[in-house]
Image (cartoon, rainbow, N blue to C red):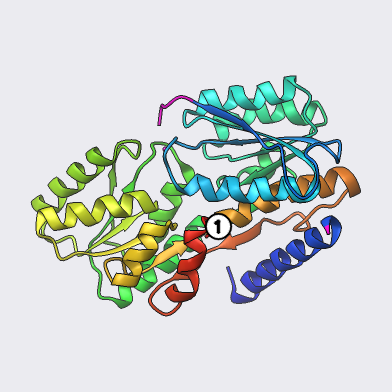
Amino acid sequence: MTARTRTFRIAALGAAVVLAATACSGGGREKTEESDTGGGNAAGSSGYTIAFITHETPGDTFWDKVKNGANQAAKDTGVTLKYSNDPEAPKQAVLIQNAVDSKVSGIATTLVTPDALAGAVKAATDAKIPVVGFNSGINDYQRLGALMYFGSDETLAGTEAGKKLAEQGAKHPLCVIQQTGSVALEARCAGVKSSVPGTENIQVNGADDAAVTSTLQAKLAQDKSIDSIVTLGAPQALDAIKARQQAGSQAKLVTFDLNEQAATEIKSGNILFSIDQQPYVQGYMAVTSLYLNLKNGNDIGGGKAVLTGPSFVDSANIDKILPFTKNNTR
């Protein structure tokens, strides 16, 4: 992707946010469901109900920011938002089908396992329910029939992260995948490997922090050639800090995504940088774009994915970003 293309997509995102403002004023745990009922406009005042469906593993702080963005958009537009999640692909497909059966106005969903969700998404499009993809599935959303997409180019993000590691002298990064079958996570590691060919992947259970720590500790203790660790979520970065200390490893640590604790570790120097995909923006734009499509026929992005990342957070800008992580919007 050229710099010009990235600039165009970032500009498209900025324009989309302005337009929205003008128009309005990982596995196996039990799924949850939520409904937003308050805000600047009364919930439901627009007449639209949007199902917002993710592969969230309960307890992963990343999704709090996604939901905060979606809830704010629902308040701004008067949409009734129905949130549900399940980290298991077949169960997420059932949630999408349930939304179709309940005749919602629109569906915003992650597409982390696109082939497993294809049938349910087709059921939505066959029922003339507009679908927007976000967070995962940038290479598959059009094939599945989603109208728009909001998220990071994960291959690009991984490639850029790898370049920064290479500048630090990295030869043998360990890329930590916390959810089996996630195309987005695999793309991140593939991107890192394209910049640092010695990259090695390791699979961990992202739903169990203690297991993540012990798995990484054992690997770092066994292989002293590992000179850097790339975690693909902020909670796993915190696990890696413990594992690195227990193993007596000097490996540098970088992570994808942010939470307040990870931001604090960037401030202290324990994490070199974060590759932030700006999840609050993903949630906000997914809901707002459906509202605008339903109300006004808008197609934000003009048939192209709207990029929300990669946005790098490091020692140069952490002082600006840290307060927003405390608000759980960054």
Image point (25%, 53%), residue name: 240
Q: Position of residue 215 (x, y in %)?
A: 19, 42
Image point (31%, 54%), residue name: 237
Q: Quadrant of residue 5?
A: bottom right
Q: Position of residue 282 (x, y in %)?
A: 62, 53
* Horizontal side of residue 223 vs 132, given as left or right: left
Q: What count of labels does the image hold?
A: 1
Considering only vertical position in the picture, is 30 above or below 182?
above
Considering only vertical position in the picture, is 50 above or below 192?
above
Q: Position of residue 289 (x, y in %)?
A: 76, 50
Considering only vertical position in the picture, is 35 above or below 169?
above
Q: Nearer the viewer, residue 235 or 26?
A: 235
Q: Is residue 13 visible?
A: yes
* Horizontal side of residue 297 vs 123, given as left or right: right
Q: Is residue 27 magenta?
A: yes
Q: Which of the image's four quarters has the N terminus?
A: bottom right
Q: Position of residue 63 (x, y in %)?
A: 51, 45
The amino acid type of the residue labelled 1 equals Thr
Q: Nearer the viewer, residue 232 or 1?
A: 232
* Horizontal side of residue 276 vs 145, given as left or right: left
Reading the image, the residue beneath label 1 is 329
Magenta stretch bounds: 25-30
Q: Is residue 128 magenta?
A: no
For label 1, count other residues whose C-alpha is less than 10 Å away and answer few (under 14), some (14-19) or many (20+): many
Considering only vertical position in the picture, is 182 above or below 246?
above
Q: Nearer the viewer, residue 326 or 292?
A: 326
The local secondary structure at tag 1 comes to loop
Q: Is residue 232 visible?
A: no
Instruction: Tell me the chief SS of the magenta region.
Output: loop
Image point (25%, 75%), residue name: 169
